[in-house]
Amino acid sequence: MPQDALPPDPFAGDPHDPARALDSLPAEDEPEPLTAEERDEIVEDLSDLAVYQALLENRGIRGLVVDCADCGEQHFHEWNLLRASLQQLLDEGHMRRHEPAFDPDPTHYVTWEYCRGYADAVFSSG
């Protein structure tokens, strides 16, 4: 993944970077390699994401909202951040942690399901 697709690392060059502790994690904490089916799903998500962005960005939609099963909160992902995260998952088998959107306006984000329905409606009326 191109480095310029990700936000700059605020700890770059810092010898006290707290992320260095992650380098010493045991091997069993390493993610399992993606299956062919998982890779295909990510490629499909990237393709869908491009369509959804093309259809919705000019209507003021900034990205997607996802309900997080781990923490029970909603996570707001701008188009480019989500694309970079999915591409990283495809390339490296995992996603890096990233800063959440700062004070997002929920009215500017929609769900995957909304995007699918919107795209289906646009293409069926076409």
Image: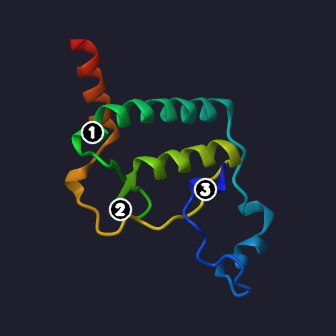
Q: How many marks?
A: 3
Label 2 residue SS: loop
Q: Residue sitting at 64 percent across and 52 percent down?
A: 94
Q: Position of residue 17 (x, y in %)?
A: 67, 82
Between residue 105 and residue 28, name the one nearer to us: 105
**Height in image: 80 above or below 97?**
above
Give the CA separation, mark 3 to mark 1: 24 Å
Q: Position of residue 88 (x, y in %)?
A: 62, 48
Q: Position of residue 6 (x, y in %)?
A: 57, 58
Sequence-wise, which precedes: disc 3 or disc 1? 3
Residue hosting label 2: 72
Determine the residue located farthest toward the bottom in the rendered image.
Answer: 16
Question: Residue 4 shows which numbered tag?
Answer: 3
Amino acid type shown at disc 1 = Asn
Label 3 residue SS: helix
Give the CA separation, mark 1 to mark 2: 30 Å
